[in-house]
């Protein structure tokens, strides 16, 4: 079970991200350009909390998760875990408490390894067992925890369905008894019926183990179901953060309003009554960002101030943070 008392100050957030930036050099012809995948992002994740991260494809959601775990070296900014700053020097120790579940269960598992060896690899790396019998027992306990049978241990990843493969990936992440897991669109590659099973399993694991999640996804209905708070990203920046229900019921930022207006509701009366907010124009290229607010080229509320300055997140009450001058 995750130890929630490792830091003496329980009121402190488990994960604290300050002004995180991740820029990639890109060559276009003879020009060297900079792609700002993540540009000045800040947020916190509490102990045992789920923070949902949503936005369009290419907005930088996955890059945030990977940079947070130092899979990409940050261009700038700081990430604190349990009060300690994460650096290249201490990341190996931190990985015992921070893990990741990847998006594609078909490519994130080694096809040459059995399920037992896939789940046992983190145990091997961090030397978390004293003998082979203990290793086997831990692996079988992890498999049972995620709904896999003991006889699956000697099989290979290609013998399983997508949902079962994702369960193997989740068991691998849980092997080191982490306090925090980055879930990078863990259900987007699965059938809808299987998605519900996996999402419910994430919730059950959180209740049992007290683990915190950064849950990255496209599907706002899934994110609302599992998240305590939701952060909305647009072109490398977070434009709104709020309590899950509050953001879905009363979005403030024009981009959040547009996203939520597209969420299907299984009630024909409500669907007919509400108005779909369709954004005009195309998403700007991250290689050629507009000045000021990145969203202003598609925003009907944009003013001259939006072209000159980039709005910062401001608290509108109850921790509802919005980056907009005119809303």
Image (cartoon, rainbow, N blue to C red):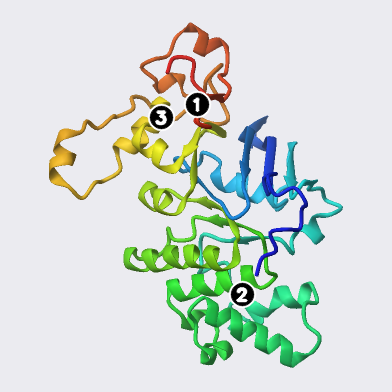
User: Which numbered circle lies on residue 253?
Assistant: none
Q: Give the mark nearer the N terminus: 3 vs 1.
A: 3
Q: Nearer the viewer, residue 243 or 286?
A: 243
How packed mark 3 is, by other alpha carbons closer than 10 Å (few <14, some 14-19, many 20 or more), is many
- Residue at point 52%, 88% (across, down): 152
Residue 278 at x, y percent in the picture: 29, 29
Q: How far separated are the C-alphas under marks 2 and 3?
A: 39 Å
Element assignment for label 2: loop
Which one is closest to the eye, mark 3 or mark 1? 1
Check disc 2 and report the residue beneath it.
110
Element assignment for label 1: loop
Check disc 3 and report the residue beneath it.
255
Q: Give the mark nearer the N terminus: 2 vs 3.
A: 2
Residue 55 at x, y percent in the picture: 46, 40
- Picture quadrant of residue 188: bottom left
Element assignment for label 3: helix
Q: How far separated are the C-alphas under marks 2 and 1?
A: 47 Å
- Residue at point 54%, 55% (across, down): 184
Q: Nearer the viewer, residue 287 or 59?
A: 59
User: Would residue 1 be found to the left or right of residue 152 on screen?
Assistant: right
Quadrant of the frame with the N terminus: bottom right
Check disc 1 and report the residue beneath it.
317
């Amino acid at each position: 079970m995750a130890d929630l008392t490792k830091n003496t100050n329980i009121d402190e957030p488990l994960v604290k991200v300050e002004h995180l930036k991740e820029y990639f050099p890109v060559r276009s012809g003879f020009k060297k350009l900079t792609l700002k995948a993540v540009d000045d992002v800040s947020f916190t994740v509490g102990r045992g909390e789920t923070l949902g991260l949503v936005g369009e494809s290419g907005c930088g959601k996955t890059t945030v998760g990977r940079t947070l775990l130092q899979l990409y070296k940050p261009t700038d900014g700081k990430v604190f875990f349990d009060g300690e700053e994460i650096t290249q020097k201490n990341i190996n120790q931190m990985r015992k408490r921070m893990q990741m579940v990847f998006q594609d269960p078909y490519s994130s598992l080694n096809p040459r390894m059995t399920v037992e060896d896939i789940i046992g690899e983190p145990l091997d790396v961090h030397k978390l067992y004293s003998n082979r019998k203990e290793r086997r027992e831990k692996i079988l306990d992890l498999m049972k925890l995620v709904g896999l049978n003991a006889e699956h241990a000697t099989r290979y990843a290609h013998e399983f369905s997508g949902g079962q493969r994702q369960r193997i990936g989740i068991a691998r992440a849980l092997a080191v008894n982490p306090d925090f897991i980055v879930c990078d669109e863990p259900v987007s590659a699965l059938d809808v019926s299987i998605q519900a099973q996996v999402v419910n399993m994430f919730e059950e694991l959180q209740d049992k183990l007290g683990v915190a999640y950064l849950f990255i996804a496209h599907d706002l209905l899934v994110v609302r179901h599992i998240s305590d708070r939701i952060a909305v990203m647009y072109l490398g920046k977070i434009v709104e953060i709020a309590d899950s229900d509050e953001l879905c019921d009363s979005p403030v930022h024009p981009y959040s309003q547009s996203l939520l207006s597209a969420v299907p509701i299984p009630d024909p009366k409500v669907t007919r009554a509400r108005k779909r907010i369709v954004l005009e124009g195309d998403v700007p290229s991250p290689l050629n960002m507009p000045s000021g607010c990145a969203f202003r080229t598609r925003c009907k509320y944009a003013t001259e101030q939006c072209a000159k300055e980039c709005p910062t997140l401001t608290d509108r009450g109850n921790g509802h943070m919005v980056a907009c001058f005119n809303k």
